[in-house]
Image (spheres, rainbow, N blue to C red):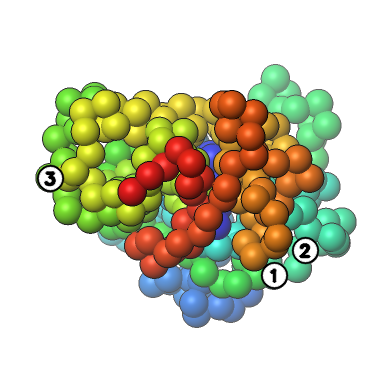
Amino acid sequence: MPELPEAERACRLLRESIVGGTIRAVDTVEDTIVYDGVEHGEFAQELKGRQVLAVHRHGKLFWLELSSPPTNSTKSAGTGARHPLFHLGMTGMIQLRGGEPTWYRVRPKDMASWPPRFWKFVMHITPPQDPKDLQETDRGEEIQFAYLDARRLGRIRLRLTPRLSPPVSLLGFDPLLSPLPLSTFSALLLRRQMPIKALLLDQSFSAGVGNWVADEVLFQARVHPERRASGLGEEEVRRVWEKVGEVCRTAVGVNADSSQFPRDWLFRHRWGKGRKSSSPSSSSPLLLPDGTPATIKFITVGGRTSAYVAEVQKL
């Protein structure tokens, strides 16, 4: 599932490409699951003619801040202009025409076709008038970007005030945008009786932390995923707090390109559960500090498969 680093990658792509542009048209396809609380045609109509002012993110959710509707729009006389809010779900991606999608772990095979397979909308954007605001390759050309989702677990919504409305308003701290002081993090964590892995997955606690980020954090903090949060020691809490920020910053620093993640990360070795190898998805094993191969085990915590290293994450 795309997590905070992948959502930030999508935001960067949009910030670099469409901010300042004006939405000329939006092509949509009907999908009563992905479009949440809005009909696909209504979604297209509300965005038409509005300028993209900014791209925002909190946790795994991101949204476009748009200008008010044009004066000739039927919405301009209404109760307020809504802004598009997105969640990528399990397989959602953003793709610019002529570029590759913001894929997660596995690059799609057919990236040249347009509209892309599994598309839900294609937004047609007139670039900013000032050529200094445009990338050289985009100058004077219409920009098109698509939202696509094969498994239909993503969501497309419209909100008047995205940051102040559910689901964004229900989220906890964002490790990059609104990190907590250690004292606050510790106080919130130690009052919870659930396993630490389940707590990290709780979006009302740490927004944007998903399965692989949580496993990476706990591996690097040397904490077993089934340990009860309230039972962690002071030093263990400090390590978890430190690694939540460090893992997210490192992944975002390489634009969520997993091929550039550090070689000693669990992420590089955790995939392919069930293979006869201590490091299921890597040709070279994950090594412990003493140089011996690590033993990667899998359990279910908080309803999710959790990877951990038995030698350093003890219950």
Mark 1 against mark 3, which lies toward the viewer?
A: 3
In this figure, which residue is indicated by the disc labeled 2? 115
Identify the mark at residue 144; answer none if there is no mark. none
Q: Nearer the viewer, residue 86 or 158?
A: 86
- Three-letter code for the amino acid on which mark 1 is drawn: Phe
Q: Earlier in the sequence, mark 3 or mark 2?
A: 2
> Pointer 3 and pointer 2: residues touching (CB < 8 Å)?
no
- Three-letter code for the amino acid on which mark 3 is drawn: Arg
Q: Nearer the viewer, residue 135 or 132?
A: 135
In this figure, which residue is indicated by the disc labeled 1? 118
Estimate how packed mark 3 is, as few (under 14), some (14 to 19) or many (20 or more) residues with alpha carbons within 10 Å. Answer: few
* Picture layout, residue 309 above or below residue 19: below
Position of residue 216 measured from the top left corner of the image (x, y, whole percent): 49, 41
Position of residue 146 measured from the top left corner of the image (x, y, whole percent): 67, 57
Q: Nearer the viewer, residue 103 or 293?
A: 293
Q: Is residue 113 visible?
A: yes
Residue at image point 17% right, 53% down: 193
> Pointer 1 and pointer 3: residues touching (CB < 8 Å)?
no
Q: How many marks?
A: 3
* Picture layout, residue 242 above or below residue 271: above
In this figure, which residue is indicated by the disc labeled 3? 191
SS at mark 2 in the image:
loop
Q: Quadrant of residue 263?
A: top right
Residue at image point 21% right, 33% down: 233
